[in-house]
Image (tube, rainbow, N blue to C red):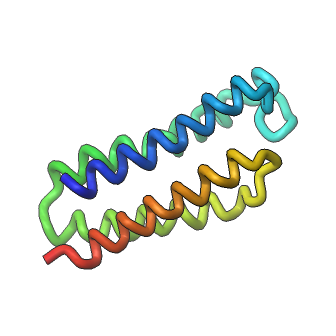
Protein backbone atom coordinates (compact mmCIF):
# COMPACT_ATOMS: atom_id res chain seq x y z
CA UNK A 1 0.00 0.00 0.00
CA UNK A 2 2.84 2.40 0.82
CA UNK A 3 4.48 1.89 -2.58
CA UNK A 4 1.18 2.29 -4.39
CA UNK A 5 0.40 5.48 -2.48
CA UNK A 6 3.87 6.83 -3.24
CA UNK A 7 3.29 6.31 -6.97
CA UNK A 8 -0.04 8.15 -6.69
CA UNK A 9 1.71 11.05 -4.93
CA UNK A 10 4.37 11.22 -7.62
CA UNK A 11 1.78 11.09 -10.41
CA UNK A 12 -0.19 13.92 -8.80
CA UNK A 13 3.02 15.96 -8.53
CA UNK A 14 3.56 15.56 -12.29
CA UNK A 15 -0.05 16.54 -12.97
CA UNK A 16 0.22 19.56 -10.67
CA UNK A 17 3.16 20.76 -12.77
CA UNK A 18 1.09 20.37 -15.93
CA UNK A 19 -1.85 22.30 -14.44
CA UNK A 20 0.42 25.10 -13.20
CA UNK A 21 2.04 25.33 -16.65
CA UNK A 22 -1.41 25.84 -18.18
CA UNK A 23 -2.44 28.52 -15.70
CA UNK A 24 0.93 30.28 -15.81
CA UNK A 25 0.81 30.40 -19.61
CA UNK A 26 4.17 28.64 -19.83
CA UNK A 27 3.20 26.52 -22.82
CA UNK A 28 1.84 26.88 -26.31
CA UNK A 29 -1.05 24.60 -27.15
CA UNK A 30 -0.15 21.94 -29.69
CA UNK A 31 3.62 22.30 -29.18
CA UNK A 32 6.29 20.40 -27.28
CA UNK A 33 9.70 21.96 -26.77
CA UNK A 34 8.88 24.74 -29.23
CA UNK A 35 7.90 22.48 -32.12
CA UNK A 36 4.52 21.34 -33.39
CA UNK A 37 3.64 18.15 -31.54
CA UNK A 38 3.14 15.05 -33.64
CA UNK A 39 0.96 12.06 -32.80
CA UNK A 40 4.11 10.14 -31.91
CA UNK A 41 5.10 12.86 -29.43
CA UNK A 42 1.63 12.73 -27.82
CA UNK A 43 1.85 8.94 -27.58
CA UNK A 44 5.28 9.30 -25.96
CA UNK A 45 3.94 11.79 -23.43
CA UNK A 46 0.99 9.51 -22.69
CA UNK A 47 3.32 6.55 -22.15
CA UNK A 48 5.50 8.51 -19.73
CA UNK A 49 2.44 9.67 -17.76
CA UNK A 50 1.08 6.10 -17.69
CA UNK A 51 4.16 4.76 -15.91
CA UNK A 52 3.08 5.84 -12.39
CA UNK A 53 -0.48 4.64 -13.06
CA UNK A 54 0.77 1.20 -14.14
CA UNK A 55 3.07 1.12 -11.10
CA UNK A 56 0.09 1.73 -8.79
CA UNK A 57 -1.63 -1.36 -10.22
CA UNK A 58 1.55 -3.46 -10.25
CA UNK A 59 2.38 -2.48 -6.66
CA UNK A 60 -1.01 -3.83 -5.61
CA UNK A 61 -1.00 -6.99 -7.73
CA UNK A 62 2.53 -8.21 -8.53
CA UNK A 63 4.09 -10.58 -6.01
CA UNK A 64 7.21 -10.18 -3.94
CA UNK A 65 10.16 -10.16 -4.77
CA UNK A 66 9.41 -9.15 -8.38
CA UNK A 67 7.57 -5.97 -7.41
CA UNK A 68 10.47 -4.92 -5.21
CA UNK A 69 12.85 -4.81 -8.18
CA UNK A 70 10.29 -3.37 -10.59
CA UNK A 71 9.72 -0.44 -8.19
CA UNK A 72 13.45 0.18 -7.75
CA UNK A 73 14.27 0.04 -11.47
CA UNK A 74 11.31 2.13 -12.66
CA UNK A 75 11.82 4.82 -9.99
CA UNK A 76 15.51 5.14 -10.89
CA UNK A 77 14.71 5.29 -14.63
CA UNK A 78 12.19 8.09 -14.03
CA UNK A 79 14.79 10.09 -12.12
CA UNK A 80 17.26 9.68 -14.99
CA UNK A 81 14.55 10.64 -17.51
CA UNK A 82 13.68 13.79 -15.53
CA UNK A 83 17.32 14.79 -15.06
CA UNK A 84 17.56 15.34 -18.82
CA UNK A 85 14.94 18.11 -18.59
CA UNK A 86 16.69 20.12 -15.88
CA UNK A 87 16.76 22.98 -15.35
CA UNK A 88 13.24 24.01 -16.29
CA UNK A 89 12.54 27.67 -17.03
CA UNK A 90 10.04 28.07 -14.16
CA UNK A 91 10.92 27.87 -10.47
CA UNK A 92 7.74 25.90 -9.69
CA UNK A 93 8.68 23.26 -12.30
CA UNK A 94 12.15 22.84 -10.81
CA UNK A 95 10.63 22.65 -7.32
CA UNK A 96 8.09 20.00 -8.38
CA UNK A 97 10.76 17.91 -10.12
CA UNK A 98 12.78 17.94 -6.89
CA UNK A 99 9.62 16.85 -5.04
CA UNK A 100 9.18 14.01 -7.56
CA UNK A 101 12.83 13.01 -6.93
CA UNK A 102 11.99 12.78 -3.22
CA UNK A 103 9.01 10.54 -3.99
CA UNK A 104 11.19 8.41 -6.27
CA UNK A 105 13.78 8.17 -3.50
CA UNK A 106 11.12 7.08 -1.04
CA UNK A 107 9.88 4.46 -3.49
CA UNK A 108 13.39 3.07 -3.90
CA UNK A 109 13.95 3.13 -0.13
CA UNK A 110 10.63 1.45 0.73
CA UNK A 111 11.15 -1.20 -1.96
CA UNK A 112 14.77 -1.78 -0.91
CA UNK A 113 13.94 -2.14 2.81
CA UNK A 114 10.89 -4.32 2.16
CA UNK A 115 11.18 -7.49 4.19
* Left or right: 4 as drawn, with respect to 79: left
Looking at the image, which residue sits at the far right? 34
Q: Position of residue 41 (x, y in %)?
A: 67, 36
Residue at (52, 55) in percent of width and height? 100
* Left or right: 62 as drawn, with respect to 111: left
Residue at (81, 25) in percent of width and height? 28
Q: Position of residue 12 (x, y in %)?
A: 46, 39
* Left or right: 96 as drawn, with respect to 1: right
Q: Position of residue 108 (x, y in %)?
A: 37, 70
Q: Position of residue 114 (x, y in %)?
A: 19, 74
* Left or right: 58 as drawn, with respect to 49: left
Residue at (55, 36) in percent of width and height? 16
**Between 102 and 60, the one nearer to me in the picture:** 102
Residue at (75, 49) in percent of width and height? 91
In the rendered view, tell whether residue 50 sits above or below residue 70. above
In the rendered view, tell whether residue 87 sits above or below residue 109. above
Task: Give the position of the C terminus as an image quadrant.
Answer: bottom left
**Between 98 and 27, the one nearer to me in the picture:** 98
Amino acid sequence: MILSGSWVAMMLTYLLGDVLRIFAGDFTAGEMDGQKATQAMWIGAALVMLIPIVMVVLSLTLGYPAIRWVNIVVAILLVIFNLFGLPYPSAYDNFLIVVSFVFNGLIVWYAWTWV
